[in-house]
Amino acid sequence: MKKGVYYYHDIQKEEVKIMKKLLVGVFSVMLVLAACGGGDDTDDNGDTGGTGEESGQEQENGDGGAEETAQAGEELYNTNCAQCHGADLTGGAGPSLENVGDEYSVDDIVDIIQNGKGQMPAQDHLSEEESQQIAEWLVNR
């Protein structure tokens, strides 16, 4: 092959290499976004009626239900939120939730989980009760 002379099949090979790299990049980004989309971001806002009061009553009455709710909230967080917000709440793809209870109420957090906020999509796969458990755990941990 002479210097400076390019053949059609050589150009095609280079284009294929570039397209492969591009596709790998696009699929990588999609994978990351899909993993974070399923998680609960704890910038939650929510109106749940009397659910927060009921949980408070359980704690005041010394019922073991509050402990079970906290445990369920932590498990739900680990399953649905930790992918983006980190198992230690320090953030990652999503913001840190270490002090989320200082900025938002339980109802606010539930609303964010249910309806989304900013870049966080609504977590439609979680029931309002599950969102409430996560929010209470985040605020009271």
Image (tube, rainbow, N blue to C red):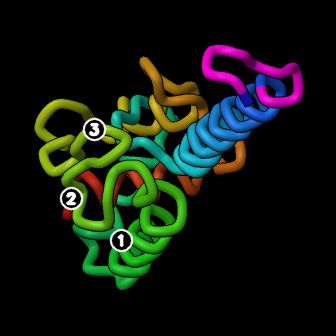
Residue 140 can be seen in this image:
yes
**Relative image position of residue 136 (x, y in whole percent):** 34, 54
Q: Name the residue that disc number 2 marks.
A: 140
Callout 2, which amino acid?
Asn
Which residue corresponds to the image point at 11% horizontal and 38% vertical from the top-left?
A: 102
Vertical placement of residue 65 versus 15, above or below: below
Residue 141 lies in quadrant = bottom left
Which residue is at the front of the view, 135 or 31? 31
10 Å crowding of disc 3: few (<14), some (14-19), many (20+): some
Q: Is residue 1 left or right of 65 when viewed as pictured?
A: right
Q: Is the Cβ of the residue at disc 3 closer than 8 Å to that at disc 2?
A: no
Q: Quadrant of the N terminus?
A: top right
Which region shows up in magenta?
A: 2-10
Question: Quick check: is 4 in the magenta stretch?
Answer: yes
Give the residue pinned by disc 1: 70
Assign a secondary structure to mark 2.
Answer: helix
Q: Residue at x 16, y 31 (%)?
A: 103
Q: Which mark is residue 91?
A: none
Residue tagged by mark 3?
A: 95
